[in-house]
Amino acid sequence: MINVFSEIGQLKAVLLHEPGNEINNLTPRYLDELLFDDIPWLPLAIKEHRNFAQVFKDNGVKVYYLVDLMTEVLNLNDEIRKEFINRFIIDANIKSQTLGEMVFEYLYGIKNNKELILKCISGIKKNEIKTFTNRTLSDYINISSPFITAPIPNLYFTRDPFASVGNGACINRMYSDTRRRETIFADFIFEYHKDFKDVTRYYNRTDDFEIEGGDILVLDKETLLIGVSQRTSSQAIELLAKRLFYKEQTTFKTILALTIPKERTFMHLDTVLTQVDYDKFLIHEGCYNNLHIYKITKDMDNVGKLFVEQLEQKLDDVLANFIGKKPMMIFCGGDDNITSDREQWSDGSNCVCIKPGVVIAYERNEYTNELLRGAGIKVITIPSSEISRGRGGPRCMSMPLIREDLK
């Protein structure tokens, strides 16, 4: 069920999560903590997301939903259901045994498993558990918070909690506590779901170093591009490299690590760089001129070790060594700094390929979309006045599960 050896091969199956009541549980007070800059209007966000999903379906892509896969997992048996609830309570950082028992009783009492998953995602308010009272010092100090478990509003960016890499998956350790809880769903799907339980894991949510899916780009069967960013550490990249090169004996031989500014504006590599065709890449010019690129391969003189070298070339010259020709670099927003910065902020550099030369992009990034069309790319635009408020584009909102191999 996982076959992703490129960014552009014909997409056959994709994982999505439709935003739900977790968005309605956003408030201005908790925006920073929950990694949002604004509060989307949920009815329109749902409509925009369904339009996004329909584009995939209209182009022959099978759409899987995270909630549906998790529901199928919990439907397997009651022991898995109990295990999930207990681990969810741990991930929610509920230390009090009494409160943990209350939350378990509340969640276990939700008999419909889809409703149970949706409740875990949307958050549990204190007033939903009738027996809740302030008992501990933490309860009294956190009296202003309306939640026992906070909502998980970033989950519709399915690219980040895990990453499809070749025939395996990285179940990621997320950068922030808020998003770290998201990976419990992928963990259970890859542990128990009949279609995914035999997939090899190259990384685990319990590993020591942070890495997120938006920083992982699959160039070909032998090469990955990984961003060293605000949310992905160099140590995580080296750990993943050792597993890919040695432990799992994959086809991957090279990782190109690209440093990007550690700022919210550039939170992941795919917010500044995406591949749109065999020899065309969309990139934010400000990052193009300031990238540091490191090539990671096996150390041929020391088994189990890595060889790292800094490359002095520009990105397009580096990529030419892997794709066989110097690629066209299409600058998000063109060469005007204001347009470039504005459209990068609204994810103009972040689009997802359905097949070589065909991408889904936000309609709001008009200038970038015209540049793509001028370069021979077919651009299918989607409305995004609400879903874009979470600071993520079409690539961020979709996790490819199966792509056809490139010819």
Image (cartoon, rainbow, N blue to C red):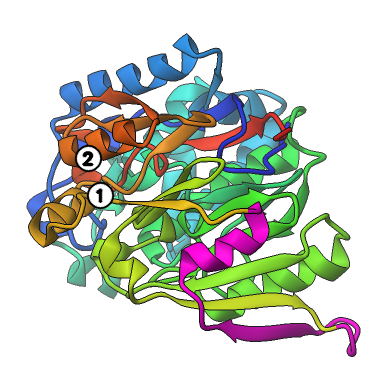
Quick check: can you spot residue 387?
yes
Q: Give how far apart the Cα atoms at labels 1 and 2 are.
A: 5 Å
Q: Is residue 340 above or below residue 208?
A: above
The residue at which mark 2 appears reads as 388
Q: Is residue 164 above or below residue 204?
A: above
Find the residue positioned furthest to the bottom.
301
Q: Is residue 41 left or right of residue 197?
A: left
Amino acid under disc 1: Arg
Q: Which residues are magenta?
A: 300-324
- In what quadrant of the picture does the C terminus appear? top right
SS category of the residue bearing label 1: loop
Amino acid under disc 2: Ser
Residue that appears at 70% across and 35% down = 406
Image location (x, y in percent) of residue 205:
60, 61
**Residue 318 colored in magenta in the image:** yes
Image location (x, y in percent) of residue 325:
60, 53
Image location (x, y in percent) of residue 218:
61, 51
